[in-house]
Amino acid sequence: MRAKLSTMFQSLQVRNYRLFTSGQLIKLIGVWMMFIAQDWLVLELSDDSATALGVVTALQFTPVLLLTLLSGRLADRYDKRLLLFVANAFWTVLALGMSLLVITGVVQLWHVFVFAALLGVANAVETPVRQAFVSELVGMPLLPNALSLSAATFNTARIIGPALAGVAIAVFDVGPVFVITALSSLAPLVNVVRMRPAELHREALPPIEERASARVVDGLRYVARRPDLLLPMALMSVIGMTLFNFQLTLAALAKTVFNTGAASFGLFTTALAVGSLAGALASSGRRSRPSVWVVLGSAVTCAAFGTLVGLAQSYWLVVALLVPAGFAMIYFAQASNQRVQLGVDPAFRGRVMALWVLVFLGTNPVGAPVIGWVAETYGAGASIWIGGLISLTTAGLALIWQLRRSGARVRLRFVPTPRFYVTEV
């Protein structure tokens, strides 16, 4: 048991990665508290408008759509550690400004819209750089484990943050939550400075002269020639746009369908995060590139549970279903991420991961307003199960395409329990 735990957390033995992870955990707890507070603030300022929530989500992710590919180019040309410091410093300044507006009571809905858009700019720079930086922290042998632990860190924060936010909003209102977010964002700044550059794994990178000529279009052409990278990205673009909108849909579900408060909304998010954390830890033992069948199977499972969450009529049934839904979502996301990262040339990693972030987060500006409109017109539950069915159809079509392309076939064996097999021909 001890050996298994040691293997599961092996990347934490690397000092630079340990600093990176601890800083991210502190910051992300504050970020998730802010997301809950921001959504609740929007509902208060807009008379419970799901459409307004959709607009905020769209504004938050539009910069990702517009700027991420350029950020990937920056990641392949310049020092990722320095870029992370600048992006996190910008985030800290924004969080401090927003907390002042909320605490002083002068905040208006358009302030939240502007704040969300500017945070999106910080995310558009920071996220692809952070994704590409992990390989420099631990090296390729530990990369699958480090990616899974990074996902576990994210989902640990998603468990703790909403739970704390629900209590803090009920006791203190939303203002102090934004202050906590601003203070927590200092942690990654301090830890990035404390890292040892000499211990970074940069030996696989091309010379600085070659990196200086890195172009966005070259990264796009590289991915276009790689069907093994295109398939997980295509799946993520659709599922991310139609189903990975729980920040929006769960807030509307809690407030408009079940008529509950901020604490109950936090419970929804916490249940989803508990499952997501389990899915991330389940992925941490992987030491090689996941197969396409792992990606496709987890995509089908993720879409199926997402559909069930939207169809559930009971509050506690939703809570129960969000746990396996969260597990399947993060297992699919991690399998896809690892398949992309472990299959890409180091010279293109920044640009390819920027494209990954674009399909993972950049589709939100397209999907969020539509999802918000569906939630307001037909109900929050419908916005979830419709997205689930679209995702399920997409995953099914991708599975059929891969089976035909590879010449494989699916077999079911009932000895002693039903099992799913994909056999290469």
Image (cartoon, rainbow, N blue to C red):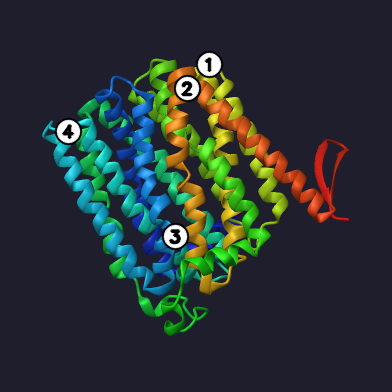
Tell me which numbered mark, 3 or 4, is placed earlier along the sequence: 3
Say which element carries label 4: loop
Asked if the residue under mark 2 is in contact with the one under mark 4, i.e. CB atoms within 8 Å, the reply is no
Say which element carries label 2: helix
Rendered location of residue 91, percent (x, y): 27, 53
Query: Three-letter amino acid code at disc 2?
Result: Ala
Q: Which residue is mark 1?
A: 314
Please state which of residues 381 and 421 is positioned toward the viewer in this rendering.
Answer: 381
Q: CA distance from mark 4 to mark 2?
A: 27 Å
Residue at image location 45% in from the left, 18% down from the top: 377
Q: CA distance from mark 1 to mark 3?
A: 42 Å
Q: Which residue is mark 4?
A: 107
Query: Three-letter amino acid code at disc 4?
Result: Val
Callout in the foreground (3, 4): 3
Please state which of residues 202 and 238 is positioned toward the viewer in this rendering.
Answer: 238
Q: CA distance from mark 3 to mark 4?
A: 33 Å
Rendered location of residue 5, percent (x, y): 56, 56
**Label placed on residue 7:** none
Callout in the foreground (3, 2): 3
Query: Three-letter amino acid code at disc 3?
Result: Leu
Callout in the foreground (1, 4): 4
Rendered location of residue 252, percent (x, y): 41, 24
Q: Which residue is mark 2?
A: 380
Asked if the residue under mark 4 is in contact with the one under mark 3, i.e. CB atoms within 8 Å, the reply is no
Residue at image location 17% in from the left, 45% down from the top: 97
**Label placed on residue 69:** 3
Residue 385 sits above or below residue 237 on the image: above
Asked if the residue under mark 2 is in contact with the one under mark 1, i.e. CB atoms within 8 Å, the reply is no
Query: Three-letter amino acid code at disc 1?
Result: Ser
Q: Is residue 387 left or right of residue 252?
A: right
Asked if the residue under mark 3 is in contact with the one under mark 1, i.e. CB atoms within 8 Å, the reply is no
Q: CA distance from mark 1 to mark 4?
A: 35 Å
